[in-house]
Amino acid sequence: MPRTPSRRTALQGLAAAGAAVVGFDPFTRSWAATATGRPLAGLPKLDGSVHTDDASLAADADDFGHIVHRRPVAVLRPGSVHDIVAMVRFCNEHGLSVAPRGQGHATQGQAQVDGGLVIETTPLATIGPVGPGSATVTVGAGAKWSEVARATLAHGLTPPTFTDYLELSVGGTLSVGGIGGQTHQRGAQVDNVTELQVVTGAGHLVRCSPTRHRDLFLAVLAGLGQCAVIVGATLRLVPAPETVRHYLLPYDDLRTFLDDQRLLVEEGRFDYVEGQVTADGAGAFDGYVLEAVAYGPPAGPAPDDTTLLRGLRHDPAGAQTSDLGYYDFLDRLAAGVAALKEAGLWAFAHPWLNLLLPGREAATLAASLLEDLTPADLGPGVVLLYPVLRESLHAPLLRTPDDPVSYLLAVLRTTPPDDTATVDRLLAANRAAYDTVHAAGGTHYPVGSVPFDAADWREHFGPAYRRLATARHTYDPRGILVPGQGIF
């Protein structure tokens, strides 16, 4: 009987294979390139392909953060879900780590893997079918939320919650949570999933839901990829409005701004509530804009300004109101993102800070953190600050403060990637900010760049850690999935 190949043998074989497509030779028990580009005899047939060329490896050794660079030895572009099953099983056999990658929008190497396999989920982009009155839609993990929205809106339907940027993959946001301006009413994106199709770390294709393999379902949603690779999801749908009324309401006092935001989400007066912090000419971050949206028919009544704005303490002279098509509102960042890409700023480093502040301490914490922020350290980024209701969040691994209302503070920094001293300083500042917020009962929303070790993660998950660790042992017993998170 041939010996099981070592991880070193598999790595050497993969590293030596410089062609675009490689195959596994069952006789030498190692990887080798083929002149024809077809897998060698004996490999489980792949509908897609495995790539080891420099361009593919370099691309997947980077992400939107442009801070961490871990080079894989191979990239899978699957032609089917069964390709993922086959390759995860192969990686189990050889002790190779695996990381799924959607749109590569991570900021600190979370979806990178040093010396292992990256699975690009973008080919898994099927959507539908959707029919009039459908309660759900099943989509591939690689589908972008913009594509899902357009497909469902053709039938007057929409997912309930969106992140601000639509060009993210479904599998990517479901792995972290998916918080947006609708979360106070509709929950996070993970709260609007009725079923998942996943490939476990052991290489098993499983359907899971609240009633079927419930432990796996709850461990995958906001589980940071530690137990399974999401390959498909069934999403809840609700009636979509045709138009929305969009309000931008200025404030000059932080506590008043936060209190009015809290009033709006507790009353459910608006369908969407967010907010931004702005800097004055002297560089002080002491201006605030409450962003609120009311849906129009058929999802809601015609917006009435007097009713919606009653009792708010913004500066009415600076208020802006506009009526938009629903998709135009959802995709409102598109023009700004295009401008950033044209200017080369999309390729800058993004040492983001994303924290959830307990409502009872939000004004004090936000004031302290904003006092230390400078326009130079933010760069051409933005600062978001808005509330979510704990009662709307149900995924146990999406950790929030023990407070009925939490505030998401997102400092979306942008800085030149070659200025490593500044990047390191900002990462240290992120950690210091996290420590301050954590001491007050706040949590980390894990899409940003806060240096964490395994002990930090254990404390982050708190009483939910045992659930995640048990599921990890059950469904990824060799611990090959997503080492970039640094949880285990």
Image (tube, rainbow, N blue to C red):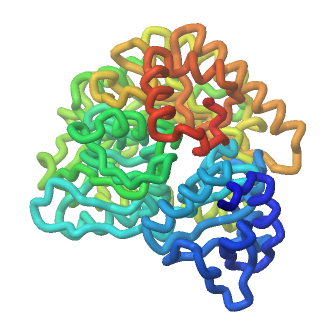
Looking at the picture, does residue 375 appear above or below residue 140?
above
Toward the viewer: 110 or 199? Answer: 199
Q: Position of residue 56 (x, y in %)?
A: 71, 69
Residue 398 occupies quadrant? top left
Regarding residue 282, the answer to whether it shows in the image is no
Q: Position of residue 125 (x, y in %)?
A: 41, 68
For the image shown, how many numbered marks are present on the structure?
Answer: 0
Toward the viewer: 350 or 26? Answer: 26
Looking at the picture, does residue 256 appear above or below residue 77?
above
Quadrant in which the N terminus is drawn: bottom right
Q: Which residue sits at x=74%, y=65%?
A: 57
Q: Is residue 348 left or right of residue 204?
A: right
Q: Is residue 227 left or right of residue 106?
A: left
Q: Is residue 439 left or right of residue 321?
A: right
Regarding residue 95, the answer to whether it shows in the image is yes
Farthest bottom residue? 36
Q: Which residue sits at x=62%, y=34%?
A: 411
Looking at the picture, does residue 452 appear above or below residue 321?
above
Toward the viewer: 117 or 278? Answer: 117
Q: Which residue sits at x=66%, y=75%?
A: 23
Residue 152 occupies quadrant? bottom left
Quadrant in which the C terminus is drawn: top right
Q: Which residue sits at x=51%, y=35%?
A: 276
Looking at the picture, does residue 347 appear above or below residue 209?
below
Q: Position of residue 486 (x, y in %)?
A: 66, 33
Q: Position of residue 361 (x, y in %)?
A: 50, 10
